Image (tube, helix red, strand yellow):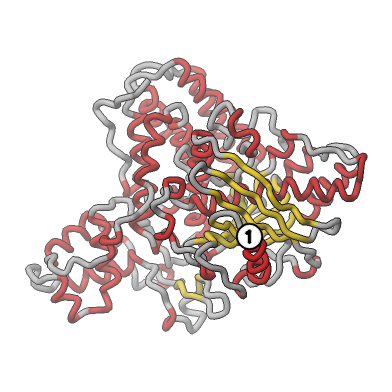
Amino acid sequence: MTYQPQNLIPRRDPAMVMKLARLGSFHQSRLSFMRILTRRMTRENWTFSRPVFEIDDQGVGHAVFCAHTGERTYSLVAFAHDLPADKRSDRVIAEAWDSTFTLFDGVPTADDIARLARNVPLQEAGRVTERELSVSRANRSVRLWEHVVSHLAAGTQPDTTEIAKVGYLMRTTAVYGSGKLGAADREQIAERPEFSAPFQVEMLSVYLTRVYVRDLVQHMANQRGGAKAATLAPEIARSMGIGNSTGLGMAPFLLNHPKLLNNWIMAREEAIARVRSLATARPADAKLFRELLARSVVSAKIWHSEHEIQRDKLVELRRDLDVLVARTRSSDLVGNYPWDHLYGWAETHLGVDAQECLASLMLEPYGDLVDPLTDGMSDADYSAFRIKGAMTLAHVSKILADRYHWVSGIDWAAAQNCARLWYVSEEKLEPRLGERFEEPLADYEQPLAPGRDAAALQTVIAGLDQGATVAEFLSKHPEHRCSMRRIQMAEHAPYAEIRDNTIGSDLLPIDMLRCKLSFFGATHFDPRSDRWVRICLFGNAPFPEELQHAKSDDWAYPPREAQVV
């Protein structure tokens, strides 16, 4: 059945959606990049193989895991290392890891593997070629790793309570693509259907890494236990994802890619509007929604964090989800625009986190309405970066009034509103956030305060001839070039700009991290400070041998019987 929404309810106002507090409360959805990938792998009947597994009894060696699309093959080349405990670190300045990886375009030869063995374990200190699509590394969750190996070696299954406390056996500390370290540029593969959606190379790399981790832990248990070793139960293996530690390096991405951000948010907001516009719902749709809501309650219960901000958000989310469950028991979710009424109720009765959880849940029964929107989530419009020199300042002023009206509510001269600045570290060439009035960093500031810069531009052009062109203006005021480009892009991209202060003393970079990671499909965000967060990727996802038997696309929601600790 194909749904054709009528009397379309408008997309939510960017002035509300693009606030950091809301962006930092997004949840995974049907539009998340991991789920786009697993749907494609299932739909196109991808096959998988492991042609190489040369890892010794000490857990050192290499392996190759292949994904065959029918048209092409992509191979994760994994290197397993014997890492001393004192060298294990999730920080970007680390120089050694438990495992290192590259996603190879095709099937690597012995010569390719030898070349990669000289470079991939070095990460930033090495170099790869255009045959490599990504470079990544991961560390073990040491305590859980030993727990699983020792139990399997002894012929027993690991304790699911212990597994639930962590959720993964390894966590990646970086997954680099798009030309990093010499790897293939995005343009080289963007036209391939399997990579047309955003971050599909990186998601495939992580998916295959999860297979590698499962096989490696089993291998180590077999080496230790011999014939008495048990095989890890599929349901236990499936419950574990790949952890990830993400820091400040990811936060500026949303600011540096305004058109791409717009496309992501626009797709999600269009999906929400389409579902809210449905006059009726099938009983099966309401049943699926209630089932996934119940599993979301379980997800919230098994989601833990020691960070004060996240702890408070979890308390509110759990309470609100219970209220939402009670509401849905007494509500008609079939007739009279059920989803619009339910969302309207949520806006006045639930906190932001639960509102965004509900927004994602409402999309689940409607793959035919929602999934085609993934086709527009990439950004291939490179012409948008060209400044339109013939545009008049009057036109620029109109865009500022429409898209940047919020900047006038901030006193940009106040110390607390410009207390911080973004710069790039010399040591690792990674974005960092400094204290403007405590560190001598002003000369190195990056243009990552679009609100402040738009306000400055607005002040300058207000007293000028509004008939003058942008080209004339920039010839005299080139310092506003970057801001002018953003403003022109925002004219046709209402969700391109975060409508908040990105250099204020109260900035929480973890809001930007969560926004981006929710589009990846991450769950169980666990901030370790306001600047870095741990997450889980592909938790409960089907393994390659299970893809064709998966009943649905709902693996991102834990089963009702998931262990609560």
**Mark 1 residue element:** loop
Picture quadrant of residue 538:
top right
Q: Is 99 or 20 nearer to us in this picture?
A: 99
Picture layout, residue 390 above or below residue 194:
below
Query: In the depicted view, which residue is nearer to us: 377 or 564?
Result: 377
Q: Give me the residue at 43% from left, 32% from top.
A: 363
Q: Position of residue 176 (x, y in %)?
A: 54, 62
Q: On the picture, is 89 further left or further right than 435?
A: right
Which quadrant of the figure has residue 307? bottom right
Question: Against 7, is 537 above or below?
Answer: below
Please determine whether, in this image, residue 436 is positioned above or below residue 368. Answer: below
Q: Can residue 490 be spotted in the picture? A: yes
Q: Nearest the camera: 459 or 256?
A: 256
Examine the rendering and report whether any part of residue 268 can be seen: no
Residue 386 at x, y = what percent? 24, 66
Q: Provide residue 545's location: percent of width, then percent of height.
A: 65, 35
x 37%, y 35%: residue: 272
Q: Badge 1: how crowded within 10 Å, few (<14), some, or many (20+)? A: few
Q: Which residue is mark 1?
A: 109
User: Residue at 24% across / 70% down in the picture?
Assistant: 457
Write the residue at 53% across / 28% down.
323
Task: Name the kind of residue labelled 1 in the image.
Answer: Thr
The quadrant in which the N terminus is found is top left
Instruction: Give residue 377's position: percent from left, percent from top.
Output: 38, 47
